[in-house]
Image: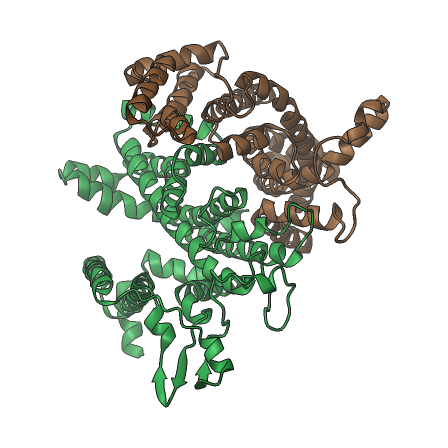
Amino acid sequence: MGKQKEKKAIWGTTLGEFVQQQFVKRPINMVSLVCMALLALMAVIAPVLANNKPLMIRIEGKLHFPLFQNLSPADYCIFLAATVGFLLLLLIRRNHSNLEPSVRGAVLFRQLCLSCTIILIGSPLIFIFVPRRLEAADYKAMIAENKADYAVFAPIPYGYDRTDLMSRNLSPCRTHWLGTDDVGADVLCRLIHGSRTSLSVGLVAAGISTLIGIALGSIFGYFGGKVDFIGMRIVEMVMAIPTFFLIITFVAFFPRSLLSIIVIIGITTWTGTARLVRAEFLKLRKQDFIQAAVSLALPLRSTIFKHMLPNCIGPILVNAAFGFAGAIFAEAALSFLGFGVAPPTPSWGQMLSSGVTTTGRFLWWLTLFPGLAIFLTVMLCNLIGEGLRDAFDPRLKNAI
Amino acid sequence: MIVPTLLGITVIVFAISRIAPGDPVSSHISSRGEFDVKKTIDVRKERLKLYGLDKPIHIQYVNWLWRVTRLDFGQSVKHNRPVIKLIADRLPITLTLNLIALVFIYAISLPTGVLAAVKHGRFFDRAISVFFLVLWSLPIMWVGQMLIGYFAGPAFKSWFPPAGISSIYADRLSFFQWLFDRLWHLALPVVCLTYTGFAYLSKQVRAEMLENLSMDYVRTARAKGLPESAVIFRHVFRNSLVPVITITASLFPAVFAGSVIVEKIFSIPGMGLLMFEAVANRDYNVVMALATIAGILNMIALLLADIAYALADPRVTFEGNT
């Protein structure tokens, strides 16, 4: 430990470490981060948590694992991506204690490339080698008929696309903890699977909008002058149409699938990030170290990505966190209006909309729980965003 | 500067409608179920000519724009009426709803914002900021659905009507009764529209107040021996109000967007519900008209905010800023 401290003293504190220290200081930040991680974990292992196939079943003395045999290749790809992502996080932690700050960037870049390669090669392999099996065997009936010796089911033993006309619109009871919806699917199960839709929309849409925002904002901010003027007019035009109106205008003309919704939300919400990055770049451009980079005739790529962009990473990250919340919100609103993903795919907004039936009945469990899920997720994102903002700029908090 | 922006809005809306796969004519034909291929192609060509869709895209745009400048957005397929008449019917309802909500937003958020700033760092301030964050994160569809379920249905209390903006017998009521009836119908939607804007605005007011409170002139005012209330209300509050004007303009889009969901939940026949129906029925003329008009209204709101800003703060000039 002593050696560690010595090293640290020589290296000094990097921005990342500083932000981390500030972030960890407030317990609410850590609580929301942990909750978010749990939510992500739930989304990743959703098919293991809630599935109508048993985890393990013993038929005539032989053990079977129907759940794992029935997972789709896409599920395995998600597992792979999540594992690689988690390992990458561990590696970054290790980098921070073992490597000098000056080489960290290059090492991290190599690790990122490596993990991307693993995912890119692994996913097609999974799709080739894992067959899509559709097994219609009703394991519950088997147990009822005493064909199987014993079975271990997932905690919520229902599929998200279950239809059971005998148990429609049940209020919460012991077999269905959060009740069932109008086709008899278990609400809790659909909630768990719905977190995948919400989180993937949030992640990818926020990613797209941040990337577009960074690209355009950095061009406007770096070149300034006419480019900036014309660019900002374009941004103003896009901003003039209310975001949600713009989104549903797109939705009216384009096919409604998960992918197109993600892309639509991504390409309509970049204006905030673009303005932010542009403002930061305009400020940075005047500073000495950028002048030095320019006068050294460094390539444009290097000036923008190595010298300027890392200096405005804070506001971008904070904005991305709020964008994440906004995208989840937008997706829920779209699904609520019926413009979202098609019904068998679970989505929180769509579940919420079935709470008031056309006959005027109010099924409170169909409204309360999905709404609560959206609310908590959005709230966590906002809390993390606020925490990050305070961590990046502690002066802001002290001043106010 | 406003003319190019308006043009830009129309370009965006037009572009969205044209890059989308498929064209309005084909969707018509396929829905009729005509199987004779040759005849279908002929019909399609004729229709394309009828709507001017056989011309190059920029000419189509100019034609469309020319019609838009005369407020002619074409016919609504679903309602079989000119789009502009539909909008003229619906716009006042949305504006009434949003203006009432805006009044409430201001009436609640100014005092709370000021109070939070004055009690900075104390319990009230902390509690209210947590409260704002919660309000800000509440999904509007959830709140609407819960309100309608609990207060406008047989499930719990039926204090409010669940849908529409007036009762069936509204024609026979005297003016005040009619007004009361209207307000009674609008109460829940207004609550829904108010709470998000309120959280946002209070936060901004608080931040502005705090920034002004740390200024030198406040110290001077206190040193003069002015009572605290005079310092707060006559000096700080007035100065903090100026940026709030610009924030109002940024509230507008949120209010418009929120109204799609709120109007859908409470079946209020306003712009939002029209947009919803148009998207659900793929009534393209209506969608394009609504997006354009919402953009233009929003631009006007921004412009008014800029003018109001200049009027309120004599230090702001438009010269040298363009």
Of all residues, the one furthest to the bottom in this rendering is: A61
Residue A180 image-quadrant placement: bottom right
Q: Residue at 43%, 63% (x, y): give it.
A: A43
Chain letter of the brown region: B
Which quarter of the image is occupied by the N terminus of chain B?
top left
Residue nearer the viewer, A378 or A149 = A149
- Left or right: where B137 falls relative to A83: right
In the figure, the green chain has which letter? Answer: A
Q: Is residue B63 visible?
A: yes
Can you say whether A216 is above or below A139 in the image?
above
Q: Nearer the viewer, residue A323 or B14?
A: B14
A34 with respect to A134 (left or right): right
Asked whether, in this view, residue B321 is left or right of residue B233, the answer is: left
The percent coordinates of residue B113 (x first, y second) are 65, 42
At x 60%, y 52%, the residue is: B134
Nearer to us in this view, B315 or A234: A234
Spot occupied by residue A381 in the image (x, y as percentages of width and height): 48, 54
Q: How is the image coloured?
A: by chain
| Position of residue A22 measured from the top left corner of the image (x, y, whole percent) | 44, 60
Q: How many marks?
A: 0
Q: Is residue B8 above or below residue A300?
A: above
> Residue A284, relative to residue B270: is it above or below?
below
Q: Can you see residue A286?
A: no
Residue at 35% from the left image edge and 81% from the top image edge: A64
Q: Position of residue A255 (x, y in %)?
A: 38, 39
Q: Quadrant of residue A253?
A: top left
